[in-house]
Image: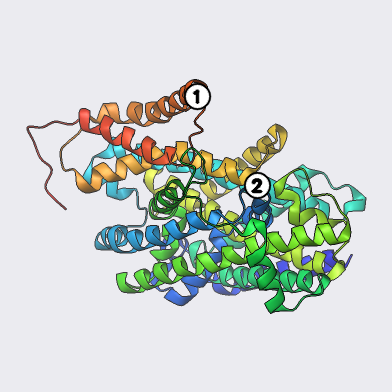
Amino acid sequence: MLVLITVILYLGALLLLSHVVGKRGGNAAFFSGNRQSPWPLVAFGMIGASISGLTFIGVPGWVMSIDMTYLQMCLGFIVGYVIVAFVLLPLYYKQRLTSIYSLLDSRMGRTSYKTGASFFILSKLLGAAAKFYVVCRILQACLLPTLEVPYALVVIVALLLIWLYTRRGGIRTLVWTDVLQTLCLLLALVLILCKVISMLHMGVGEAMTAVWQDSHSRIFEFDDWASKQNFWKQFLSGVFIVIVMTGLDQDMMQKNLTCKDLRSAQKDMCSYGVLFLPVNFLFLSLGILLMMLYQQQGLPLPAKSDDLLAAIVLDGTMGTACLVLFTIGVIASAFSSADSAMTALTTSFCVDILGKEQDEQTRKRVHLAMLLAFVIVTLAFNAIGSGSVMDLIYTLVSYTYGPLLGLFAYGIFIHRPLRESWVPYIAVASPVICYVIDCLVLQLTGYQVGYEMLMFNGLLTFLGLWLSSYSNKRFSVI
């Protein structure tokens, strides 16, 4: 009951904040926040938007199978954020874009523009729903477990709350609500860490030493090239994952484009990029300390890595206070990720697909339609089930964001006109070919292709666009 009361108070605070901030609504506030957002708030809130509820639940468990090698990818993330800040943001701000996919229209043409936006909508809907489905399972276990609340009801109520506090203010509201949610997420993480350290009868210094000396503290993997955890695979994948999941993603870029000018947006992006590494280090350190706690308590490790944190919290081993913190952390991270996804999907569909940026009634109807689509896809993931959903997310990114990477690379660096009727077929064929190659390579050589498939997918799309281009004409450089 204490958990339920705390959650109600938290959601009440969220709705109140959104009501105050979103009073002056309208399409300009919904889509671009009137370009008045303070960059430190955007940077801080972006942490919560990136660290989804799935990250909060799943990343600590990764140490069970891959140690702390995820930090190799996080190092690549930093380089990726620098590239986004100093290559992509100047292009977006120069044209004062509401949707970043409008860049494809000016560079390549209408069909390429629609194709890029369509791939974003598909990718974001699948990825965000996959994250949200796991979080809702945890919420179902945390809230009123004795009442056996149906999973579908948890999904519908959670998404309805998100729709309520984003329907008027949109991105303007999210900049402020994300600050509250990021603060709650980080506070929950730190307090859970302190609780685990206390249960292990350690001080902070002793805990740091124990993490460093643990066999699962391995960060770098240079020796095994075939391993998915090889440093160069992880590092380069991290660079390109940030480029596509942040720089080519309307969800993440929409908040950055609410800053008043390019310099503010660049400071926001670089600050947020640097903060991402220590936050994930804390999550992985929590994972190692949790494994020690399992051993101390004589508990078997869970079969699924995603359950490492959730299982020991939900069974009451860590006490009611920790259960409250865990629930708030999960809700804060889940809502911060899902609300921005729903807003970005609405923006892209209105601006890119329908071309009705100024029509407020259309925007409201599309926003409601995105709520329904989110519910359907989340329930579908629950019906299908999955192993490690974090791995599933990055695999989906490799296949669905690859064409976006190829489209933007061609649009930015190559100025030759295309046979535009070919573009949708090239964008669809590229991930299909990648999947076939992945299966053949695994069967013939035993080599497991990792997240580097994203780079190959983007290259394949780029080459297809090059082959479909005309060499006797040139676009003017914008």
Residue 136 in percent (x, y) is at 72, 50
Q: Identity of the amino acid at label 1?
A: Cys
Horizontal side, residue 384 vs residue 226: left or right: right
Horizontal side, residue 291 vs residue 298: left or right: left
> Does 387 sit above or below residue 350?
above
Rendered image: mark on residue 439: 1
Pick whichever, 412 or 66, lies toward us.
66
| Image quadrant occupied by the N terminus | bottom right
> Does 222 sit above or below residue 257?
above
Please indicate, yes or no, whether residue 79 appears anywhere in the rendered image: yes
Where, by quadrant of the figure, is residue 181 drawn?
bottom right
Rendered image: mark on residue 48: none
Horizontal side, residue 173 vs residue 120: left or right: right
Pick whichever, 347 or 463, lies toward us.
463
Q: Identity of the amino acid at label 2?
A: Ser
Q: Residues within 10 Å of mark 1 (few under 14, many from 20)?
A: some
- SS of the residue at dot 2? helix
Pick whichever, 442 or 99, lies toward us.
442
Q: How crowded is mark 2: few (under 14 residues within 10 Å), some or many (20 or more)?
A: few
Residue tagged by mark 2? 65
Measure how far apart labels 2 and 1 are at the Cα level.
23 Å
Where, by quadrant of the figure, is residue 254 drawn?
bottom left
- SS of the residue at dot 1? helix
